[in-house]
Structures are given as structure tokens and as C-alpha cells.
Image (tube, rainbow, N blue to C red):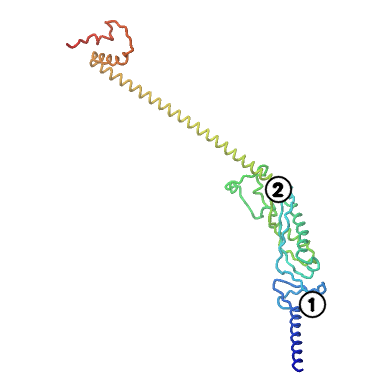
Amino acid sequence: MRTLIKQSIGALLLIAVIAAAIILKSAAFAVDQAEQVVVLQFGKPVGEPVTEPGLHFKVPFIQELRRFDKRLIVWDGDPNQVPTRGREFISVDATARCRIVDALQFLKSVRDEAGAQSRLDDIIDSVVRDNISSTELTEIVRSKDWKVSENELERLDVVPLENTAPDELTESIRLGREMLTRNILKEASKSMPEKYGIELVDVRIKRLNYITSVRLQVFQRMISERQRIAEQFRSQGEGEASRIEGDTSRELAQIRSEAQRKAEIVRGEADAEAMRIYNEAFATDAGFFSFLRTLESYPKTLTERTVLILGTDSDYLQFLNSIHPVE
């Protein structure tokens, strides 16, 4: 009997220990240093949010927990088509960073991060659109402290597009990208209701681009401008080539003329020297010279088909008539 009682008491103690462990596990919860917790009882918040890291307790089985991040929450909006002050349609892609500073208000107003993203879409997109539409494109693209000289543009071979003002690249910037984003952050923070429990930390323009139709027109303008510049360079090159060819032809004609002149001089001097030698030879022995020149003419004038009708007293045959056969 006593053994049965001891066994029953042991079983009850074991059950009590297990039940206590289950209750303790359900009642205790740990809070990480990067999060904050709101305790809910029957779906309604109870007390203040738990923000201190460590071990905390709640009523088991009745109360539940909703955990929220203390760290920055990233918001990325969808690219929007916005006209600038100069009526250029551009695609603006903005991003923001925010933080949950009041978890209780955050839970009551937007419930979760998805609801916060929806509220931020409405507020930030509206502020970005208003600021972009009231600002010139150069103010949006460039920084206020960015400066460039005309000499540097020439050194980098930067050629403004057609219909672009010559001083557009060197004009001073009144606002600039950095100041624009500061204004967007300031206005968006004012528009953020305190009931959201959200602090807007930073807003940035992640990407700017022309819309598709305008971008194609810009690319076509760039291509046309570069083609025009290429044609200009090609025309200048062809003109320079024609000038070089003309100079070469003129120099070649001068060289040929000078060479022909010198050749004629040399030829005339050679003919004169030849005539002088002939005259000296003729003066030395006129008969022998006449005989030699006559013999040289025979092979040139007398061939197998040559027919000459000459008298026996012709001077052309005088040397042949004077030859006597060898006996």
C-alpha cells in the first residue's frame, strides 16, 4: 500500500514539474538587442513595448508577442515617370531608410512592415514627385560643388549635343542633388504622422534616367551628332588629302620638269662634244673619215631586199668601184 502511494506521489511530482516547465517556457521570452517586443493580450497591446534586451516574462497561454526590428528598415519605391521643371520626362527611382521608434504606435497604425511600406509609398513618392517636377534637370543630376572648366571639356573632347546651350555644362548649380535629397527628406519627415511610430532617417535618389521614348530620342540625337562630327572630320580629312595630293603632283611635275631640263642640257652638251670629236677626227684625216662613215652606212641601207639604181659614177659606190680584186 505504501509503495503504491509513493509511486502516485512520484508521478504527481513529475507531472507538476513538467507542467511548471511548460508554464515557465510559455511565460518567459528573450528579447534580442536588435529588436523590440509588444505584448498582446486577446489581440490588444498590454503595457509599454519591451525594448531592453534580456529575459522577460508574460502571462502564459493568454498573452502573445509581436516582435519589431530596431534596426533600419529599407524602403525601395517603384520607378516613376516624373516631368522636370524643363518638361523633360525622366524615370526616378528613390530609396529610403527608416526606423521604428515607437513599436506600440507602429502596431496600432500600420500593423506590420508591409503596412509601413504602403504608407511610405504614398508619402515619399508624393514628395519626390513634387520636388522633381519643380527642379531643373541639371540641378537633379549634378552636385552643387561639381565644377568644370571649358578647357577641361575641350581636353576631354566633350561636345555638347545639338540644341544644347553652350554654357549648360559650365553653368553654376543653385541646388544640386545633395540639397535636393535633403529637402525631400525634410518634407517627407514633416508629412510622416507621429502615430505611425516611424522615424525617417534618409532618402536618396537611387537612379535617374530618361523614359524609354525620350531615351531613344536622346540616343538618336547622340548618334546623329556623332555622325555629323564624323562627317566633319571626314570632310576635313578629304580636304587635307586633296591638298597633299595637289602638293605632291605639283612637286612631282617640278621634279620631272627639272629632270627633263637637266637631261636636255646633258644631251645637248653630249651632242656638242660628239660633234667636236667628229670634227677633230674629220680634220685629222678627212678621207679616212669619209671612208669609215660610208662603210658604216652600207649595213644600214643595203639589205637583201634593197634595190638601188645608181650610176657607176655615183659617190655612194666610189669606194666599192675602187676595190681591185686580189690576183
Using the rendered view, name the quadrant where residue 14 is placed. bottom right
Q: Position of residue 27 (x, y in %)?
A: 76, 79
Residue 271 vertical placement versus 16 (above, below): above
Residue at image point 61% right, 49% down = 149
Find the residue positioned furthest to the left: 327
Q: Is residue 55 above or below residue 10?
A: above
- The crowd level at tag 2 (other Cα within 10 Å; few <14, some 14-19, many 20+) is few
Which amino acid type is shown beneath numbered disc 1? Phe
x, y (%) of residue 106?
Answer: 78, 68
Which quadrant of the figure contains the C terminus?
top left
Expressed as whole percent of the image width and height from the top left, the position of residue 40 reads 80, 73
Provide the secondary structure element on which disc 1 rests. Answer: loop
Residue appearing at x 73%, y 49% in the figure = 89
Res 61 label: 1
Q: Identify the mark nearer the N-term, 2 or 1.
A: 1
Q: Is residue 89 above or below residue 322?
A: below
- Measuring 79% from the left and 77% from the top, which residue is drawn there? 61
Height in image: 82 above or below 321?
A: below
Q: Residue at x 75, y 54 (%)?
A: 129
Q: Nearer the viewer, residue 136 or 55?
A: 55
Q: Is residue 119 left or right of residue 313?
A: right
* Numbered circle sitting on residue 212: 2
- The amino acid at mark 2 is Thr
